[in-house]
């Protein structure tokens, strides 16, 4: 009978407290968005998906993925472009409802096999800005523009996205 009550208490703990601990993480956020990605003169719609962690009131670390399918100017053939970024956001005025942040990070870039480059995979450096509205609430939204420099790209990479962010 003693083992049964121990199992019951463990089960109650798991069913009640574990979900509370998981969903009470107020430092995590999820980003979803869309916009445009421009590589040299080739422009296309893009999708953004991200996961972030709030280190402090001023600093957030994000893991973002961007996918687009621009048309290569020379051959007029569409190719896949994907970018996975590890970025740090520095908030200039975190206590404001409208926030301006700088973005600095690194990216893994992949250009599809439809275009011929020396390397279709490589690393880039990201620099950009983020303008966030409704900053003090769980659900906020904004605009981000990030420039990526990479030696494998055939031109500059500029991503501009409107995003929705939910903070857990």
Image (spheres, helix red, strand yellow):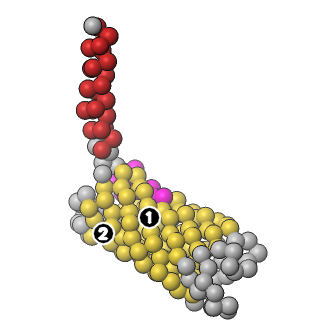
Q: Is residue 59 visible?
A: no
Which residue is located at x 25 percent, y 32 percent? 16
For image coordinates 38% across by 66% down, the residue present is 32
Q: Is residue 7 magenta?
A: no
Relative height, residue 81 to residue 54 (above, below): below
Per the rendering, the mark at residue 65 is none
Can you name the residue that lies furthest to the right here?
118
Residue 17: image quadrant is: top left
Residue 92 left/right relative to 114: left
Q: Is residue 157 visible?
A: yes
Q: Secondary structure at mark 2?
A: strand
Determine which quarter of the picture holds residue 112.
bottom right
Q: Which residue is mark 1?
A: 49
Query: Disc 1 on helix, strand or loop?
Result: strand
Tag shown at residue 141:
2
Residue occupying image coordinates x 31% and y 34%:
18
Q: Is residue 58 magenta?
A: yes
Q: Horizontal and vertical percent for residue 42?
A: 57, 87
Looking at this view, is 116 or 91 the one in front? Answer: 116
Residue 113 position in % (x across, y down): 69, 74
Query: What secondary structure prevails in the magenta region?
Result: strand
Measured in 3D between alpha carbons, the distance from the residue under mark 1 to the one under mark 2, in whole angstroms, is: 13 Å
In the picture shown, does residue 56 fall above or below 50?
A: above
Task: Identify the residue at horizontal 33%, vertical 67% (top origin).
Answer: 164
Q: Earlier in the sequence, mark 1 or mark 2?
A: 1
């Amino acid at each position: 009978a003693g083992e049964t009550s121990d199992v019951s208490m463990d089960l109650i703990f798991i069913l009640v407290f574990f979900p509370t601990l998981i969903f009470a993480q107020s430092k995590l956020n999820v980003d979803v968005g869309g916009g445009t990605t421009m590589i040299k003169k080739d422009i296309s719609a893009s999708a953004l998906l991200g996961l972030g962690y709030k280190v402090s009131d001023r600093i957030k670390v994000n893991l973002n993925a961007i996918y687009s399918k621009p048309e290569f100017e020379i051959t007029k053939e569409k190719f896949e472009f994907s970018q996975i970024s590890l970025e740090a956001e520095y908030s200039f005025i975190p206590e404001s409802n409208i926030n301006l942040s700088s973005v600095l990070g690194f990216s893994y870039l992949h250009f599809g096999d439809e275009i011929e480059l020396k390397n279709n995979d490589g690393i880039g450096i990201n620099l950009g800005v983020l303008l966030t509205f409704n900053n003090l609430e769980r659900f906020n939204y904004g605009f981000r523009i990030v420039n990526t420099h990479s030696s494998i790209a055939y031109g500059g990479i500029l991503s501009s996205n409107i995003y929705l962010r939910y903070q857990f």
